[in-house]
Image (tube, rainbow, N blue to C red):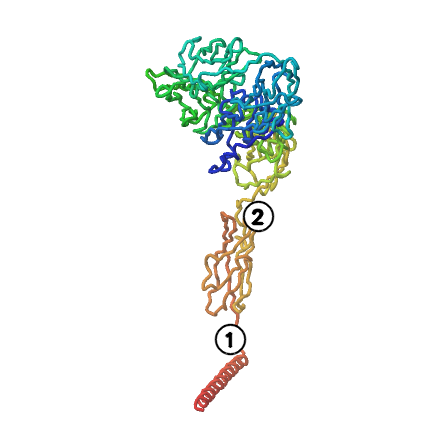
Amino acid sequence: LMESKPSGTLVGNIAAETNIARGISISGFKSLRYSFLNPNDVDIASLFSVDSTTSDITSNKLIDREKVCEFTADCVLTFDVKINSLLTSFFEIVTIKIIVDDVNDNAPIFPESEITVFIPENVNPGTMYRIDGATDKDRGKNNSVQSYEMISSANTFGLKVDKKLDGTSDVRIIVKNVIDREKKNYYRFFIIAKDGGNPPLSGNVTVNVNVSDENDNAPEFSEQHYDVSVTENTPVYSVIAKIHATDRDSGMNAKVVYRFSPHKSPEIEKLFALNPENGDISVRNELQYQSGNQFETIIEASDQGVPEQVSQAKLTLRILDVGNNPPLVTINPVSSGVGDMVLLSEGARVGTVVAHVNIVDKDVGPNGQVQCNCPHDFFSVHRLEGRGYIVQVKRILDRERNDEHKVMVICRDSGTPRLSARAKFTVRLTDMNDEPPVFTKRVFETSVEENNVIGRPIIRISANDADIGKNAIVQYHLNLADDSMFRINQNTGEIVANARFDRETMSEMKFTVRAVDEGNPPLTGTAEVLVRIIDENDNRPTFDASSLVFSINEDKKPGSEVGILRAKDADFNFNSDVEYAMLVNGAENVPFAVFSNGVIRTNKALDYEEQKRYSFNIIAKDKGRPPLNTTARVLVYVMDANDHSPIIVFPNSHNDTITVTSDTEPGTVITKVVAKDRDEGDNARLSYYINKGNVDNTFHIGSKSGEIVLARRLMLDEREDYHLTVSVQDQGKTQQASQTYLTVRIIYVNVTYIDSTHEDLRYIIIAGVVTGVTVILSIIIVAVILYVRRSDNQRRH
């Protein structure tokens, strides 16, 4: 990243740089989340942001390399990023190194804009005098100070520059010619320092030379590299080392003073002190061993000459481990939270990473080997080699049973005795929409009167959702094709009538209601609503016809049932219970009684022959409040009973004989039996029979007409009288019959003479018929013979 880039500059993409998508499904890659492993590292967090979804690293502000990496040549900012999945147990730690490239935005600058140098007059040519060189906050390859140039020195002085260990320069003014103080005791010139930028930046200092005595020797260290080790339990103020330098000058020019180079880590001066007079290095604050605890800096020795001479040497300080220290355990939550509170979805799968456990044990060997465990039913720890531990979900979570878990991680080293440290944090489960709404009843029942008022509430339903927040907010809906019958308040669950109900059309209605929460995706619960329509007496009893027709046989006894009145009432319960009665007006002589249950009975004997039909009015009334009624006319037809026998008019006891002459031709009607019946229909349809006295079937009687016909020719030797018994029978189901007697008297006449002409003609006809038949048969026989012979001749040929 080039310094001075504006806030929001894209530095890089973690997923792209690490190629982490390789070997992961698309859905798994999309579920990855990226965040700082140590969110408490405020220095890094103030400089950069990591997008949790895209893994883009962007700058939070304009970065000044000279502030972030003031004393280093290479500015590398290092931090760890954790990568975890929302769906799986995937967890990885990636170390990010961001190199901040230098921009040539600082010009070289001298400590002072004008200095004075005292040079003794007897100095030999070639003598050099040190001045403080220019410094450049830039640390890029070419952006630091690269060259010096002297302006207007009148060729009396020259310039020599040497690079020092800390990146600064040792700038020396060279006396090129003999200086004669009596001729000139003062010189003034400029030194310009330039960096290697493009374009280069420069700074200058004005140099005033006063001719005087010379401090021409710099202090010399006894060693060029001091290597000091100190144990972590060294008491504060203890002297741990001594540095020493000598100066070959004399007087103040030989008095040496010690100091740390200004280009040093602030941590050095925090832990250690350097006595400027005697060079003693002592412990300033309590020391504590940490892996890699080593400090390197530059120390300086300067004399008191004017100008001073300065020498430098390297100093390395190491802090040694001397005992067993308990591990330091830090919990870094993977997901969001406040303080030691971690928020985790209750739907997190087994293996989901909850937090990273960072362990620091400043000891070495077994004392620094740490193992951790998590004594919890729902969470466990897993070791990452060299990266601490991760806390993972061990069992399926359920917020509705327990919404908060106290988790403790215990870490122990392997020293003797074993020292331990504990870190606690709280996992608060966030709700996942895993509980559908549940109605308080499976079936809600209510009643509403028919002919109701539209818009009147009829019932309020309710459902509960064990989730919280939006997942527990329930809205109610009706499972109806339309809202013509009911409508529901989606928020309160109140159901109101949207139509006027008619119980006779529909006595009850059953429909489904749904409770839908606002989760994503939403979950639904269902229940049934049963609405019964309460009957109102708004329908009169009705008959199928305005006239009700019944019939009864005349032979029924008083008290016999004629029929049952059946009126329909579309209402319900007592509103549809109907009672019946006969209207008195005009029914005084009616031989019937109407009972409340609708039964009609006779209360007198009936006689079809006297009256065949009766009519009267009845009323049908329900038991509603108030009752409703209707009237109808009843017709009762008296059906004929076969209660009369046929009456034979002829023959009778006073007239029972007829005469027939002996020459009467067969088939002649000789008389007719006359009878009648007071009944009707089949009961009055009569049949006639000769039961006795019909010797040799001499007579035949028409069963329907009653006519008696001579059935055969009477012979001379016939009897004179035939005494016939004749019966007449009706066709009723229970047949009635009557019987009478008839005497047929035969009167013989002379029939000896027979006309011979007629007899001869009969014989002639018979002879002709025989002759004709004989001729026809002969012709047929001859034809058959000819046909057979012709067929034989055809076969031969």
Q: CA distance from mark 1 to mark 2?
A: 53 Å
Query: Above or below — where is 321 with respect to 394?
Result: above
Image side of residue 536 versus residue 259, left or right: right
- What quarter of the picture does the C terminus occupy? bottom left
Q: Secondary structure at mark 2?
A: loop
Label at residue 680: 2
Q: Nearer the viewer, residue 445 or 574?
A: 445
- The residue shown at (43%, 10%) is 239
Residue designated by label 1: 752
Query: How far across and down, in percent of the image, does residue 375 sit?
Result: 38, 20
Q: x, y percentage for residue 614?
A: 61, 38
Q: Give percent across and percent down for residue 102.
A: 58, 27
- Frontmost of labels 1 and 2 is 2
The image quadrant that residue 120 belongs to is top right
Q: Where 315 sits versus 699, above or below? A: above
Quadrant containing the N terminus is: top right
Amino acid carrying mark 2 in the image = Glu
Considering only order in the chain, which callout, 2 or 1, is on the residue closer to the N terminus?
Answer: 2
Q: Residues within 10 Å of mark 2 (few under 14, many from 20)?
A: some
Badge 1: residue crowd in 10 Å (few <14, some 14–19, many ≥20): few
In the depicted view, which residue is nearer to us: 229 or 608? 229
Give the vertical position of 86 relative to 342 (above or below): below
